[in-house]
């Protein structure tokens, strides 16, 4: 018989002996699932290394009929992982048996891994230069344990006399994994498939007030791993641990309040628990405090405080905090605008793979903000971000290829990146694809395709696309000529302040294109465009004043507006100005 088999036999013998002879006193009783039990009692360590151990635990329980039973939990441990090979209960010997029986333990809940701790995901803010959404935090699944069928399989193996062979095979796999550099989840699952019994040791610890076990139970209920998903129960266990100062439980309880999971949505409570975790140095909580201060969630908006908490998390290497800190410097929020500092923090986050930071660093290089203008560096950082799926970076990289800035001009690459961004719904990219088809830039000129892409961007409210679409309807390129549709799209763009659209809408009113003639409306739209510096609008408004069309005739106003247009090189304005001035 191998030494391993001998060890396992000794394990069971020692456990049974401890049960029968009462050599170990039971610890203080608690209650779990309506059953009175005791804190787990460590019986045996069969490991050869300090961090690799085969261990046997004993738990005493009392059922409703006050019958004493004892559970045995056999585990292989390689910190921080704990692989449970089986849970058994020991029943006293009957008249037909000379020794206690080892039976599979059954209960209505699931096993939870008490040793693997949660690493919460991150909630991001909506960063500037360009607005983003937020990514909510979520729970990772905990490790898994043997199914009830497999536990019964162990019992059947015991009945058939080959229990030790089965345990030897399982332990052998665990040893092999423990000696490797890493243990993957699927490898653990190959040894320990999921069970439907709560780990009695973990539950007893939690009921006895162990904050680590309470936090683990909270995570199990939150994720529905091993037990029915129950956010309210998760919050209960997180609170028990949090009130004892457990850092992760404080963060997770704050998360539940922030999302209204199992508790009413309450930003003030979320802030309270995030702050407690943040004060202990938790970077996730520090980052979330920054978010709460930046957007005024549960507290008065305070960019200076947001900056403070982002910085604390950023200095711990937290990429999202580094990025958000960069946006505050970039936009002068809570501190004087400082593009150089913005570049510093964007670079730190970018080097950690944050796509938004890579994009914004590219913007700084493209326009020479806080760093020397360098189109090649802009292209480098746009590409990194674009390859991670950032649609803004994809669009900007496409434009660099189209213009040959920082890269060799390549119309194929330009169109490929623009279409990548357009396919993600980026309105600016859709507009640029439409423009490329309209102008035959890098592709065969195709007005029908131009109309299609302009419409996609126009439907999202992108004013330049609305203006271009109105123009194609006006001249009948790629679509049947339709002054009513043209006027509709020009108005949408004009109402958003698009100066060219305002000028053209004035022309439509003056000439009755797609609408009744209205000289007053024409003059009003000319003025809007003229105020924004549109030379054509300035010229037409000057002529309206000269002729008294839609406005009271005023030669001084006529001269003033014609002069503005002439200063921009408008030929007709120059000619008519000479006539009016008699020069």
Image (cartoon, grey):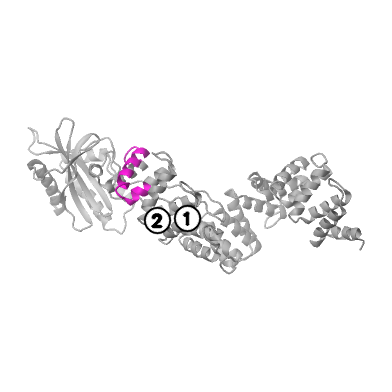
The picture quadrant where one finds residue 103 is: top left
Residue density around tag 2, few if under 14, some if 14–19, many if 20 or more, within 10 Å: many
Task: Answer whether labels 2 and 1 touch (C-beta < 8 Å).
Answer: no
Outermost residue on the right side: it is: 582
User: x and y percent of residue 74 in the render?
Assistant: 20, 46
Residue to which mark 2 is pinned:
283
- Magenta stretch: residue 465 in it? no
The percent coordinates of residue 559 (x first, y second) are 85, 57
Q: Secondary structure at mark 2?
A: helix
Left or right for 396, reference 186: right
Sequence order check, earlier mark of 2 and 1: 2
Tell which of 509 and 52 is nearer to you. Answer: 509
**What residue would you read off at disc 1?**
306
Residue in front for this viewpoint, 231 or 139 = 231
The residue positioned farthest toward the top in the image shown: 65
For marks 2 and 1, give the CA distance.
13 Å
Classify residue 491 as left or right of residue 3: right
Nearest the eye: 52 or 265: 265
Q: Between tags 2 and 1, which lies in front?
A: 1
- The picture places residue 209, in percent across and down from the top left corner, at 25, 45
Residue 478: x percent and y percent? 73, 46
Residue range of the region highlighted in magenta in the rendering: 224-252
Q: Vertical placement of 180 versus 449: above or below? A: below
SS state under label 1: helix
Left or right of 206 on screen, residue 495 = right
Q: Main secondary structure of the magenta part?
A: helix
Is 240 included in the stretch rendered in magenta? yes
Rendered image quadrant of residue 80: bottom left
């Amino acid at each position: 018989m191998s030494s391993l088999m001998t060890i396992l036999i000794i394990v069971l013998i020692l456990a049974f002996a401890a049960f029968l002879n009462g050599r170990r006193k039971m610890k203080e009783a608690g209650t779990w699932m309506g059953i009175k039990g005791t804190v787990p009692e460590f019986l045996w360590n069969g490991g050869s290394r300090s961090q690799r151990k085969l261990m046997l635990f004993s738990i005493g329980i009392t059922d409703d009929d006050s019958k004493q039973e004892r559970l045995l939990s056999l585990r292989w441990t390689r910190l921080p992982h704990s692989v449970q090979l089986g849970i058994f209960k020991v029943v006293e010997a009957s008249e037909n048996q000379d020794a206690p029986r080892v039976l599979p333990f059954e209960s209505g809940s699931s096993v939870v891994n008490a040793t693997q701790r949660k690493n919460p995901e991150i909630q991001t803010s909506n960063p500037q230069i360009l607005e983003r959404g937020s990514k909510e935090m979520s729970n990772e699944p905990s490790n898994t344990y043997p199914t009830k069928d497999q536990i019964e399989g162990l019992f059947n193996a015991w009945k058939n006399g080959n229990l030790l062979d089965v345990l030897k095979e399982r332990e052998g796999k665990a040893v092999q994994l423990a000696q490797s550099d890493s243990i993957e989840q699927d490898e653990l699952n190959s040894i320990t498939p999921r069970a439907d019994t709560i780990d009695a040791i973990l539950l007893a610890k939690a009921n006895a007030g162990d904050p680590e076990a309470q936090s683990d139970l909270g995570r199990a209920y939150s994720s529905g791993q091993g037990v029915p998903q129950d956010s309210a129960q998760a919050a209960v266990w997180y609170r028990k641990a949090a009130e004892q100062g457990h850092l992760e439980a404080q963060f997770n309880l704050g998360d539940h309040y922030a999302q209204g999971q199992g508790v009413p949505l309450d930003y003030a409570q979320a802030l309270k628990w995030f702050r407690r975790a943040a004060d202990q140095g938790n970077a996730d909580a520090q980052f979330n405090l920054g978010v709460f201060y930046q957007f005024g969630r549960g507290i008065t908006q305070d960019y200076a405080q947001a900056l403070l908490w982002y910085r604390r998390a950023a200095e711990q290497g937290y990429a999202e905090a580094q990025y958000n800190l960069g946006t505050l410097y970039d936009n002068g929020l809570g501190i004087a605008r400082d593009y150089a500092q913005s570049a510093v923090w964007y670079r730190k986050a970018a080097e950690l793979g944050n796509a938004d930071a890579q994009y914004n660093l590219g913007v700084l290089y493209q326009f020479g903000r806080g760093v020397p203008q360098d189109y090649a560096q802009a292209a480098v950082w746009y590409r990194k971000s674009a390859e991670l799926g950032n649609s803004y970076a994809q669009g900007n990289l496409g434009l660099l290829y189209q213009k040959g800035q920082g890269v060799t001009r390549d119309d194929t690459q330009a169109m490929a990146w623009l279409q990548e961004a357009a396919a993600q719904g980026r309105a600016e990219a859709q507009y640029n694809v439409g423009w490329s088809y309209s102008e035959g830039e890098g592709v065969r000129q195709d007005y029908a395709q131009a109309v299609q892409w302009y419409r996609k961007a126009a439907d999202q409210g992108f004013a330049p696309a609305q203006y271009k679409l109105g123009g194609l309807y006006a001249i009948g390129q790629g679509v049947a000529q339709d002054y009513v549709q043209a006027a509709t799209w020009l108005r949408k763009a004009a109402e958003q302040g698009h100066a060219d659209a305002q000028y053209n809408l004035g022309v439509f009113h003056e000439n009755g294109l797609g609408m009744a003639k209205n000289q007053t409306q024409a003059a009003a739209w000319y003025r809007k465009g003229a105020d924004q510096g549109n030379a054509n609008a300035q010229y037409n408004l000057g002529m309206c004043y000269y002729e008294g069309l839609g406005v009271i005739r005023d030669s001084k106003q006529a001269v003033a507006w014609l002069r503005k247009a002439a200063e921009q090189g408008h030929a007709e304005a120059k000619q008519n100005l000479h006539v009016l001035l008699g020069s």
